[in-house]
Image: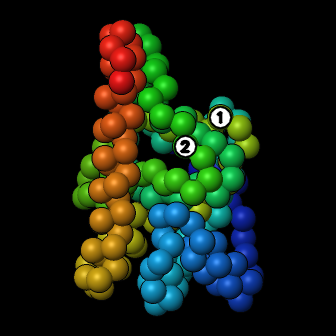
């Protein structure tokens, strides 16, 4: 798994910038200021180059990512083929399996162009969710939407491959 290029903020600039970004991102919108501040404390802005692999299928997932700019492809990868299941763009998120203990990544994710994301450390996020059940509820509820969207995209792709109209 490649790490991308991380942007370093000064402490004050970073907190203000990250709070603002998180307050407007679709995944974290409408969270309380306290929850936004908690998430900002564990977030880093990371940039991935075109065609860079962000997540590899089968590796233990470590981060939740919030897409800020650019686009990525969620792919089902085997030894014989790779199928693009879903395209992700600004406002979307991926890496939900990092919220589960020792869960392998089920799909690989590749940057389709220069892409900027916020990377939230999964272990730190899990600890924060356990310490603050209201944050835990919000994060897990939103992560379930990600899972449901991924299942739907997978169903649609397989139906398309089988010649079934969706």
The residue located at (33%, 73%) in the rendering is 138
The residue located at (31%, 47%) in the rendering is 148
Q: Earlier in the sequence, mark 2 or mark 1?
A: 2
Q: How many marks?
A: 2
Indicate the secondary structure of the residue bearing disc 2: strand
Q: Is residue 49 above or below residue 163?
A: below
Q: Which residue does the numbered mark 2 point to in the structure image? A: 88
Quadrant containing the C terminus in the rendered view:
top left
- Residue 99 at x, y = what percent? 32, 60
Q: Is residue 98 left or right of residue 9?
A: left
Q: Is residue 46 above or below residue 75?
A: below
Q: Is residue 144 above or below residue 85?
A: below
Whether residue 91 is visible, yes or no, is: yes
The residue located at (42%, 51%) in the rendering is 95
Q: Which residue does the numbered mark 1 point to in the structure image? A: 112
Residue 119 lies in quadrant: bottom right
């Amino acid at each position: 798994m490649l790490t991308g290029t991380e942007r370093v903020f000064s402490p004050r600039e970073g907190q203000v910038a990250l709070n603002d970004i998180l307050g407007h991102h679709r995944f974290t919108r409408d969270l309380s200021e306290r929850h936004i501040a908690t998430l900002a404390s564990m977030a880093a802005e990371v940039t991935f180059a075109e065609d860079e692999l962000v997540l590899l299928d089968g590796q233990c997932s470590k981060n939740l990512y919030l897409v800020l700019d650019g686009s990525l492809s969620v792919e089902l990868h085997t030894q014989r083929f790779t199928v693009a299941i879903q395209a992700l763009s600004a406002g979307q998120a991926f890496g939900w399996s990092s919220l589960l203990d020792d869960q392998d990544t089920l799909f690989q994710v590749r940057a389709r162009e220069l892409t900027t994301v916020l990377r939230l450390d999964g272990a730190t996020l899990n600890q924060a969710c356990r310490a603050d059940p209201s944050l835990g509820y919000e994060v897990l509820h939103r992560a379930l939407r990600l899972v449901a969207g991924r299942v739907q995209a997978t169903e649609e792709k397989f139906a398309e491959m089988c010649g079934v109209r969706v």
